[in-house]
Amino acid sequence: MSDDGEMEIYRTLRDTQSRYVYFLLGVAGAAIAFAVTQTREAALSWSQVPLGAAVVLWAASFYAGCRNIVWVTAGLRANAELLDVNAGRSKITGTNLQAIHAAREQLHGIFEEHSARANSNYRRQFRFLVAGAVAYVGWHVLEMYLRAVA
């Protein structure tokens, strides 16, 4: 496959992942807002604990999505610096081969660490969102039950 074809695949993958992260951020924010409107007139009671848990989980999802974006950006920054080092444009290494080799190893390690953290937050974002939905449904079923026995 040509370099252009590979780059297009990587660009498409990164764009798709980015849109997914922003979509989940929007869902988590909307879920929190919906939970607030559901309880606007309600008095505080123990039966709302599952709803509170859902809101906390959705907030954790939102936070994980934001952290994903931070780590992806940091990884891209490290990757851009690696490209400059490889091209001999880095102000730190210039064209010094020993410095370039050392910088490559260090930047590769930094990129790998940032990628691992971004991926971890990428997975957490979805898991927290789903866990919040389960807690919300649990709260809704509990409220239905309490109305039925009242």
Image (cartoon, rainbow, N blue to C red):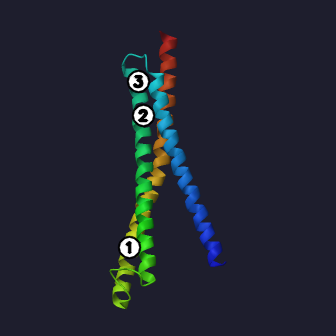
Q: Residues within 10 Å of mark 3 (few under 14, many from 20)?
A: some
Q: Which mark's residue is nearer the viewer, 2 or 3?
A: 2
Give the residue at mark 2: 55
Question: For the residues marked 3 and 1, what is the alpha-carbon distance in whole angstroms?
Answer: 46 Å
Give the residue at mark 3: 48
Identity of the residue drawn at 44% across and 55% down = 69
Quarter assignment of residue 55? top left
Q: Which mark is residue 47?
A: none
Residue 30 or 49: which is nearer the viewer? 30
Give the residue at mark 1: 109
Q: Along the horizontal axis of the image, is 27 left or right of 90?
A: right
Expressed as whole percent of the image width and height from the top left, the position of residue 134 reads 50, 35
Q: Earlier in the sequence, mark 2 or mark 1?
A: 2
Identity of the residue drawn at 48% across and 19% down = 143
Is label 3 in a helix, a strand or a loop?
helix
Say above or below: 75 vs 86: above
Expressed as whole percent of the image width and height from the top left, the position of residue 1 reads 67, 78
Question: For the residues marked 2 and 1, what is the alpha-carbon distance in whole angstroms?
Answer: 36 Å
Expressed as whole percent of the image width and height from the top left, the position of residue 135 reads 47, 33
Q: Along the horizontal axis of the image, is 141 left or right of 111?
A: right
Considering every residue shown, the one lying at the far top of the view is: 150
Considering every residue shown, the one lying at the far bottom of the view is: 97
Numbered label tally: 3
Identity of the residue drawn at 45% across and 60% down = 72
Q: Residues within 10 Å of mark 2 (few under 14, many from 20)?
A: many
Is label 1 in a helix, a strand or a loop?
helix
Are the residues at dot 2 and dot 3 in contact (C-beta closer than 8 Å)? Answer: no
Q: Earlier in the sequence, mark 2 or mark 3?
A: 3
Question: For the residues marked 2 and 3, what is the alpha-carbon distance in whole angstroms?
Answer: 11 Å
Is label 2 in a helix, a strand or a loop?
helix
Identity of the residue drawn at 40% across and 33% down = 53
Residue 35 or 90: which is nearer the viewer? 90
